[in-house]
Image (cartoon, rainbow, N blue to C red):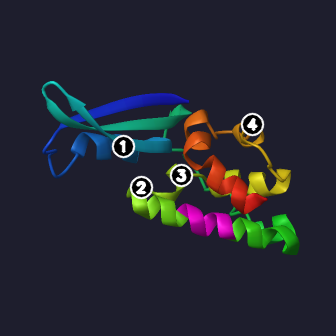
Amino acid sequence: MKYRLFQYPLPAPPELEDLNAFLAAQRVAAVTQHLVQTAGGAMLVFVVETVAGGGVAAGPSPPKTDYKEELGAEDFPVFSRLRDARKKWAEEEGVPVYTVFTNAQLAEMVKRKVRSMAEMAAIDGVGKARVEKYGEKLLAMLG
């Protein structure tokens, strides 16, 4: 994974053209935004995590995963509840749902029957910050 930082003094320009152009040209894994107070004033900071390999993938998209089929009748309702919670958290934070967790990450938590923060952190792409931010809430839903 590669990271790119975009900083804008507040009030930020309404059309963050350089950020939007970068996002359109990359395979983005996650975007986080932060409000940072400095001696010079407040800044809006975006951290963009991109998938190794650079630009947008060429060719057809991979086939969609049918999580209902993959997880089965017993586990799919748990996955569905996790997706609903993820949507709520993303809306509260004003970010796309995939920046909270991807469907694949949520499905993996359900398949592995994750019961600890360490097990959650072992899932590909789920880093320390996500575990600290959402771990307790997710474990309560998975338990």
Q: What residue is disc 4 on?
A: 118
Q: How would you rate the neighbour count of disc 4 (Cα within 10 Å): few for under 14, some for 14-19, many for 20 or more?
A: few
Image quarter where the N terminus lies is top right
Q: Which numbered disc covers residue 33?
A: 1
Label 2 or label 4, whichever comes before in sequence order:
2
Magenta-span inclusion, residue 83: yes
* Residue range corresponding to the magenta coloring: 81-86
Closest to the observer, 102 or 54: 102
Classify mark 1: helix, strand or loop.
Answer: strand
Image quarter where the C terminus lies is bottom right
Query: Residue 70, position in %: x, y?
Result: 83, 64
Which residue does the image show at 67% across and 69% down from the upper left?
A: 81
Label 3 or label 1, whichever comes before in sequence order:
1
Q: Decide: marks 1, 2 in contact (CB < 8 A)? A: yes
Q: What residue is disc 2 on?
A: 95
Left or right side of 50 for 39: left
Q: Amino acid at mark 3?
A: Val
